[in-house]
Amino acid sequence: MEVSNRLLRLKHVVRKVGLSRSQIYKLIAKGSFPEQIKIGSKISAWPEHAIDQWISHQVDHSNGGSV
């Protein structure tokens, strides 16, 4: 699988993972979701490959670890 170097802003992350903004930030605080990176003085984004890995982990975990 090819790794994406794209950066996603919060609204795209929300759409991609199906969680609300507040739920994403709660998971970040618990260390259960990838942290955003600063790409400007007031701008943050998430590496798409980190979000894709998180989604894959959630799917694997929900299947009991079997793919």
Image: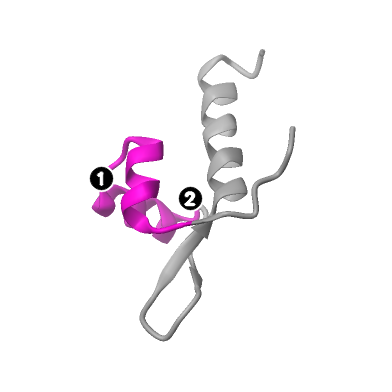
For disc 2, the marked residue is 33
Q: Residue 19 is drawn in which quadrant?
A: top left
For disc 1, the marked residue is 20
Q: Residue 1 is drawn in which quadrant?
A: top right
Q: Which amino acid does label 1 sit on?
A: Ser
Residue under the image location 73 percent in, 38 percent down:
2
Image coordinates for residue 43, horizontal then vertical, percent: 39, 75
Q: Residue 41 carries which label?
A: none
**Residue 23 on the magenta span:** yes
Residue under the image location 50 percent in, 55 percent down:
31
Residue extending farthest to the bottom is 41
Residue under the image location 27 percent in, 52 percent down:
21
Image coordinates for residue 17, horizontal then vertical, percent: 40, 37
The answer to which of 36 and 12 lies nearer the viewer is: 12
Question: Would you say 20 lies left or right of 33 here?
Answer: left
Badge 2: few (under 14), some or many (20 or more) residues near its Cα, within 10 Å? some
Badge 1: few (under 14), some or many (20 or more) residues near its Cα, within 10 Å? some
Question: Would you say 8 lies left or right of 66 here?
Answer: left
**Residue 29 on the magenta span:** yes
Residue under the image location 66 percent in, 13 percent down:
66
Against 12, is 18 above or below?
Answer: above
Question: What's the CA distance linking mark 1 and mark 2?
Answer: 13 Å
Q: What's the magenta region?
A: 8-31
Q: Which amino acid does label 2 sit on?
A: Phe
Sequence-wise, which precedes: disc 1 or disc 2? 1
- Please state, as top left, top right, bottom left or bottom right, where the C terminus lies in the image: top right
Magenta span: chief secondary structure? helix
The answer to which of 25 and 45 lies nearer the viewer is: 45
